[in-house]
Image (cartoon, rainbow, N blue to C red):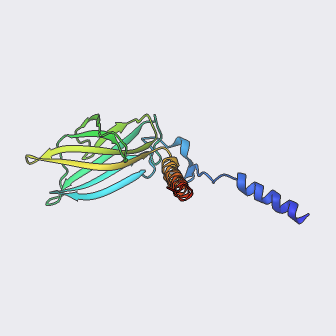
Amino acid sequence: MCFRYLGVLIVAIFFMGAAQAHHVLGRPAYSLGEDSNTPPGSEVELQVGEFAISYMAFPAFPQPRERGRINVYASYLKDGRPFDGEMSFKVREAGWFASAEEHVLGSQGPDDGVHRQGYSLEAAGKYTILVDFEAGGEPYRLEFPLQVGQSSRLPAIGMGMAVFAVLAISATVLRRRRRARGLVKP
């Protein structure tokens, strides 16, 4: 009798999926959009040359084929005034086997000191957002990460299984060759 309950418990645990959170701060995630007042999905602050840069990507959880927004705020370190030139935005896939091809998102001037660029990416994955601008005759290029949709662990698992399979097959072939050499006498 006890084993029956133990078996049911094991089966229930086996088929139980990971809990998926769909609320952020008490609001359903499906209502979060590019203009939502929720925290950004990624936020980076850095210092480049004579600028302090702040980068934010919205919504908090970008999904494929949905509109998102990138905000870049650049201010001069010496006096804190905002950069008032134009910035051009591009995107490329990130990763080992990703194409180096860059796709232009657009060019934006400042709106209240912030350069805002919309985006909509077709596929889930890891991307790099590229921001180019020129100040004082010097070109600047900034690169920021952007995760769209769920990241897949399948490629890493698949590569691990492929390496294991190659090693197992190589070991089997080597054993057979050694065994064959031992049986055949010149």
Residue 173 or residue 154, whichever sits in front: 173
Residue beneath the point at 42% across and 36% down: 67
Furthest residue in direction front, as rendered:
186
User: Image point 35% across, 37% down: which residue?
Assistant: 118
Tell me if 143 is positioned left or right of 179 in this view.
left
116 vs 170: above or below:
above
Q: Is residue 72 left or right of residue 126?
A: left
In the foreground, 166 or 50: 166
Left or right, residue 134 beside residue 183? left
Residue 135 lies, in percent from the top left, at: 12, 47
Q: Quarter-wise, where is residue 11 in the image?
A: bottom right
Q: Nearer the viewer, residue 26 or 181?
A: 181
Count of numbered circles on the image? 0
Q: Quadrant of residue 180?
A: bottom right
Provide residue 94's location: percent of width, then percent of height.
Answer: 36, 45
Asked whether 56 or 159 is in front, the reply is 159
Quarter of the figure with the N terminus: bottom right
Residue 17 appears at what percent x and percent y? 66, 52
Q: Residue at x 32, y 40 (%)?
A: 91
Q: Residue furthest bottom?
A: 2
Looking at the image, which residue sits at the far right? 1
Q: Residue furthest left?
A: 137
Image coordinates of residue 181 in percent, x first then y, are: 51, 56
Residue at 25% x, 44% y: name it.
131
